[in-house]
Image (cartoon, helix red, strand yellow):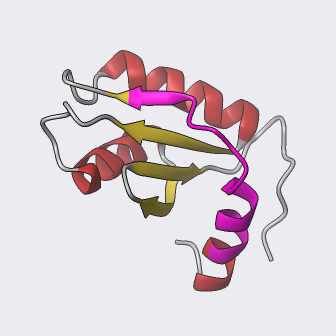
Amino acid sequence: MLTGKQKRFLRSKAHHLDPIFQVGKGGVNENMVKQIADALEARELLKVSVLQNCDEDKTVVAEELAAGTGAEIAQIIGNTIVLYKESVENKRITLP
């Protein structure tokens, strides 16, 4: 689990990032979870945008993605989810 201080740190790092994935009408599927897991391995921190036409609640989407990828939810703001997972190969972010 991330501490409040770590979440604040990750939020500041994620602020300038653009969402690279979008969850739409189909909701969360296996293929999306795999792609997000691969992207997390490469980047450690990323944003996922939940579109208006998504049937599921953004909190549910965030929990499904976090569970599927083994990531932590750093933030849910508006319709954007910030996910963090420590990379095995490409470690760039050092948490406080």
Q: Position of residue 55 (x, y in %)?
A: 12, 36
Residue 90 lies in quadrant: top right
Q: Kindly give the residue lying farthest to the left in the view shown.
A: 55
Q: Position of residue 24 (x, y in %)?
A: 27, 26
Q: Position of residue 4 (x, y in %)?
A: 58, 83
Residue 73 on the magenta segment: no
Q: Which residue is depicted at the point 32% across and 52% down?
A: 63
Q: Which residue is depicted at the point 28% across and 30% down?
A: 28
Looking at the image, residue 5 sits to the left or right of residue 78; the answer is right
Residue 23 lies in quadrant: top left
Q: Which residue is depicted at the point 54% across and 50% down?
A: 83
**Which residue is at the front of the view, 17 or 30?**
17
Looking at the image, residue 38 sits to the left or right of residue 62; the answer is right
Q: Position of residue 54 (x, y in %)?
A: 20, 33
Q: Which residue is depicted at the point 18% across and 50% down?
A: 57
> Relative to 93, does residue 67 appear above or below in the rendering?
above
Q: How many marks?
A: 0
Q: Kindly give the residue lying farthest to the bottom in the view shown.
A: 4
**Which residue is at the front of the view, 37 or 9?**
9
User: Over which residues does the magenta segment extend?
Assistant: 8-22
Residue 15 on the magenta segment: yes
